[in-house]
Amino acid sequence: MIVSRAQRKIDHINHALSTGQERKHGFEDIRFVHNSLPNTSVDEIDISTKIGELFLSSPIFINAMTGGGGRETEQINGSLAKAAAQTGVAMAVGSQMAAIKNSEEAATYEVVRRCNPDGIILANLGSEATVEQAKRAVEMIDADAFQIHLNVIQELVMPEGDRNFKQALERIERIVEEVGVPVVVKEVGFGMSHETVEKLSNVGVSIVDVSGYGGTNFSKIENERRARHYEFFNSWGITTAASLIEVNNKHPYISTIGSGGIQSAVDAVKALSIGANAVGMAGTLLRVLRDKGMKGLLEELGTVQDEMKIIMAALGCRTVEELKEVPLVISGDTHHWLSSRGIDLNKYGTRTKM
């Protein structure tokens, strides 16, 4: 049976909400060394940050989760955009390819800029996009940056998905050179290795979103939609914690976004402490919006940001950058993975905040 793109996007949302998140992101293997004399005040904590050329008032941002899907996704995108505007967080839209191929879908995305005229908004297409398509996506929502998503596993599991991934890096390079706004390259839940980031860095990419294993599992979602399951991909990938540490050890000058299973302030602060410059939340916020409405979503975003300041005060950190200096201990599967990948973890336990 042939499924329309719009219906497929609605299916993704419904399966994402019903399947839930893996919560095997690796952050459970990271523990902070307690500081009994933090010498801080919550009132002086500054959670502003930068990713590449973009200044963000908060490291939390609403990550891509909905593409074209008609009136329902338009309403979701509008609500997310209003919440972003009221809380000062950035937002990325889902893939805009639906509107590139069918102009009637454009309203699904344009609502974001109407509801959030002054905020930081990221446009989004997959690595199959041309330079012209990327420019159209940016113009559609007057985007401040452009996000390219890498979803090889999702496409392979998807019955109607792509099977040819040749020349993706060349297309990314051309977009970086010509699109006119900062470019973020993002995984969709399977993590990035430092080798992948090396290739991206070589073609001019300066911001990556590792989007590791441990959040919404698009292999499981797509397997729900097909008769024959590719279940071997359901546990595929690099955890968010391991991916962040890999990338930041090998490429410290790349701006990184940590996403994939981040549901709380503790998750967010741990991601920032191992190198992320910002953290993306998607499935958790979508579920809050569905269950508790706009009021609940605003409360959730406000609570996460307030709790981040509380945790930073306990650690003696006044800024996001200072989090990268606090001592922490890495254990469990994350320690095993990173040790096998040749990364020295002892330095994390002996870090000293200047």
Image: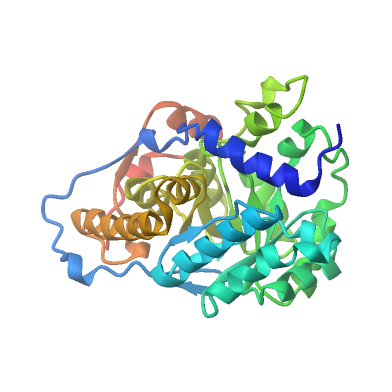
Q: Position of residue 211 (x, y in %)?
A: 57, 46
Q: Position of residue 69 (x, y in %)?
A: 70, 52
Residue 48 image-quadrant placement: bottom left
Identify which residue, 134 or 77, lies in the foreground: 77
Identify which residue, 161 or 321, lies in the foreground: 161
Q: Can residue 342 be seen in this snapshot?
A: no
Q: Residue furthest front?
A: 71
Image point 81% across, 44% down: which residue? Answer: 4
Image point 50% across, 67% down: which residue? Answer: 90
Residue 162 image-quadrant placement: top right
Q: Is residue 10 left or right of residue 41?
A: right
Identify which residue, 350 or 323, lies in the foreground: 323
Image point 81% across, 32% down: which residue? Answer: 159
Q: How is the image coloured?
A: rainbow
Q: From this view, report whether residue 212 is shown above or below residue 289.
A: above
Q: Is residue 327 left or right of residue 134?
A: left
Q: From this view, report whether residue 83 is shown above or below residue 217.
A: below
Image point 37% across, 64% down: which residue? Answer: 321
Q: Can residue 112 be seen in this snapshot?
A: yes
Q: Position of residue 173 (x, y in %)?
A: 79, 63
Q: Position of residue 303 (x, y in %)?
A: 30, 56
Q: From this view, report whether residue 294 is shown above or below residue 52.
A: above
Q: Residue furthest bottom?
A: 118
Query: What is the count of numbered marks?
Result: 0
Q: Quadrant of the C terminus?
A: bottom left
Q: Is residue 329 left or right of residue 170?
A: left
Q: Quadrant of the N terminus?
A: top right
